[in-house]
Image (cartoon, rainbow, N blue to C red):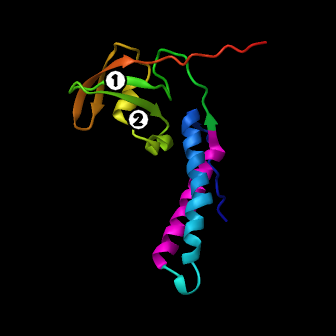
Amino acid sequence: MAMRTVDNTRIPLTQDGFQLILDRVNDIKDRQLLELRPFLYGPDRDETAVARFEDLLADLARWEGVLARASVMPESSSSTVILGSRVRIQLADGTRTWVRPVHPVEAALDDERISVDSPLGAALLGCRANDDVPVAAPAGEWTCRVLDVPRVRKSRRSK
């Protein structure tokens, strides 16, 4: 009999990324699954709803697995781009935008997050404001400029 291995590797998530995933899990449990329940049994049974219910259960299991393995990263006060840093960049066409290099599992949560496995995400790590960053993309190399890496201000605790 083959032994099943369990991947216990920690998944580094930003604090707000963890919260977005937790919100998604709660929405699936508290709203989406409940809304489908009337269509799963009896004369109102709808095979599309059953398939959607099964898809949601799979999503729920996946996201709960991510949360179980999550390691929430503290906010960084570094001026160097690290995993989870919020970075303002200027693209080659002059467009300015905010990006946040994150673990691949967190990248799809919103439009600002980009995977550190992407060409841009990988290229930004270790950079600072005013750096011109070559990005080796499949369509060819291009350059972006790091405009800002805002530092998170640490609050002082009163004693």
Please determine whether, in this image, residue 41 is positioned above or below residue 66: below
Dominant SS of magenta comes to helix
Amino acid type, callout 2: Glu
**Residue at 61% over, 41% down:** 9
Q: Position of residue 152 (x, y in %)?
A: 54, 19
Residue at x 48% of width, y 25% of height: 85
* Residue 14 in sight in this render: yes
Q: Name the kind of residue labelled 1 in the image.
A: Ile
The spot of residue 80 in percent (x, y) is 46, 16
136 shown above or below 34: above
Image point 59% across, 52% down: which residue? 25
Q: In this view, which residue lies farthest toward the bottom?
A: 43
Disc 2 secondary structure class: loop
State the residue position of label 1.
89
> Quarter of the image holding residue 11?
top right
- Find residue 112 and name its label: 2
